[in-house]
Image: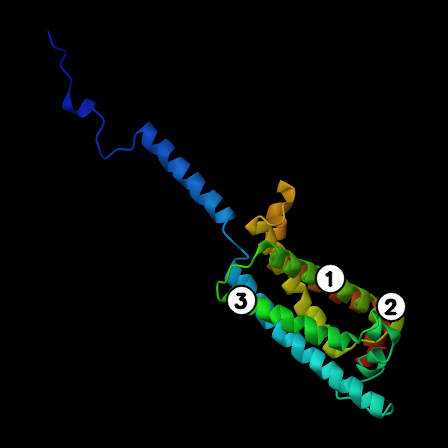
Amino acid sequence: MEEYRHPMSESSPTEPTHDDAALLAEIDAELAAERSTRSRAGLRVTGLVLLIGALVGWIASLELQLGKEILLENPDATLSCDVNPLISCGNVMMTWQSSALGIPNMALGLGGFAIMGVIGALMASGTALPPWFRWARLGGATFALGYVHFLAISAIFVIKALCPWCMVIWTVTAPMFFASLAHAVESGDLRVPAPLVNLLRRWVVLTLLWYLLVIVVIAAAFWRQWLVMFGLA
């Protein structure tokens, strides 16, 4: 005799089964993994960062070059960025650090930022660069940030003066480096240990942390001068 089954005892097609729940959970996990690996430094994004940063850096380098020429002609001249003994382009650009590599830093900036601008324009247009060119881009950005650290340390702790246009160059060099580094990691050009991958991809966060570090160091190094400047001491 055939066993009788009540129609309501069978699973309704509208009710989710165990297999359906497992499938949904798997899809959710895949979507979460996709969001976590979503590109943060794509070709065009990195290209725009390089292009904009290079343009601003080139203008700052040109301003420094013009200021240096004015001081060479008239050492007693006062530049528009000479606010006081603490904030002064002239006090910085007439030191040996302004030509530490035997070439004026302004010339390095004009040439280097021009090259980075061209690279940024190519990347922003979607042009695929050969491997050696990508490594040269990362090497140039790394050298630039390293040299900025040398100049920043010299200005803060040795020269004890801040050059506004120099700080503009510091400001644009950091995101150019961190975006280039993140792009190299995401594209597979630079292989790093797994725990570092997600960190190095967050180039915006790294840039902001670098800014915060520089601000804290400047605030601490010139604390007395700031108090006097703002009439608090």
| Residue denoted by label 1 | 143
Pointer 1: residues within 10 angstroms few (<14), some, or many (20+)? few
Residue at the spot x=33%, y=28% of the render?
A: 18
Pointer 2: residues within 10 angstroms few (<14), some, or many (20+)? few
By what rule are the colours in the image chosen?
A: rainbow
| Residue denoted by label 2 | 157
Distance Cα–Cα, label 2 vs label 3: 39 Å
Distance Cα–Cα, label 2 vs label 1: 21 Å
Disc nearer the start of the sequence (1/3): 3
In this rendering, the answer to whether 84 lies above or below 155 is: below
In this rendering, the answer to whether 230 lies above or below 7 is: below
Q: Quadrant of residue 140?
A: bottom right
Residue pushed farthest left? 1
Disc nearer the start of the sequence (2/3): 3
In the image, which disc is placed on residue 122? 3
In this rendering, the label closer to the viewer, 2 or 3: 3
Kind of element beneath mark 2:
helix
Pointers 2 and 3 in contact (C-beta within 8 Å): no
Kind of element beneath mark 1:
helix
Residue 188 seen in this snapshot: yes
Indicate left or right for 75 with 130 as reference.
right
Residue 48 seen in this snapshot: no
Kind of element beneath mark 3:
helix
Q: Nearer the viewer, residue 148 or 83?
A: 148
Indicate left or right for 53 with 28 as reference.
right
